[in-house]
Image (cartoon, rainbow, N blue to C red):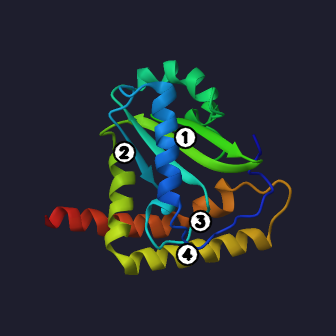
Amino acid sequence: MTSRTGKPIVIAGYDAAWPERFERERAEILRVCGADAFARIEHVGSTAVPGLAAKPIIDIMPGLRSLDDAAALIAPLAGIDYEYVPEFERPNAIDEGMPFRRYFRKDVEGERAFHMHMVEAGSEFWRDHLLFRDYLRNSPEDAREYERVKSRVAAEYNANLTPESNINLGYTDRKSDCIDAIMAKARARLGER
């Protein structure tokens, strides 16, 4: 697997093939893990929002009935080139970690192609990611603002790129204020219903 350290961030224009790439990958995941392994598998992140520019990496969120079910899925997923990355579950120099998520990544032809965020269906992570995606799908003005922020932050990150640059510091973390503002609007809209 390739490291994301020291690599420039590419924000690509929306590609209508992204949903199809998700569906093909979803089918492959279900083929190796079994149709009953997950409550659902969702396409999340910017590539799941029609018209939104994004890093061309498909974010997949399988919803487990129990996080304990994840261990049995590591080997089948490795068989289709997913690398399980348990270090993100523990506290590190960047944050407190995500013990509620099992993170996998997959490269295709030497480039990152898929991120998998395996969590319990219905968990806070699950609900928040679906709320963010669905809100952006229905709020073009907020989607455009998020795209502007991502593009600006990526350009700033790339301008200061070194071999040690970490995508989580300087890109992912610098989008947080925008994401928080959008989530506040999404939650307010949800509260109106």
Q: How far apart are marks 4 and 3 (CA)?
A: 9 Å
Residue 93, percent across and down? 67, 43
Residue annotated with mark 4: 149
Q: Distance between the residues labelled 2 and 4?
A: 24 Å
Could you tell me if the residues under marks 4 and 3 are in contact, i.e. CB atoms within 8 Å?
A: no
Q: How crowded is mark 2: few (under 14 residues within 10 Å), some or many (20 or more)?
A: many
User: What residue appears at the point 61 percent right and 30 percent down from the top-left corner?
Assistant: 86
Which mark's residue is nearer the viewer, 1 or 3? 3
Residue type, label 2: Trp
Could you tell me if the residues under marks 1 and 3 are in contact, i.e. CB atoms within 8 Å?
A: no
Residue annotated with mark 3: 174
Query: Could you tell whether 116 is left or right of 64 in the image?
Result: right
Could you tell me if the residues under marks 2 and 4 are in contact, i.e. CB atoms within 8 Å?
A: no
Question: Which residue is the extreme one toward the top?
Answer: 72
Residue annotated with mark 2: 126
For marks 1 and 4 on the same chain, the one whose residue lies earlier in the sequence: 1
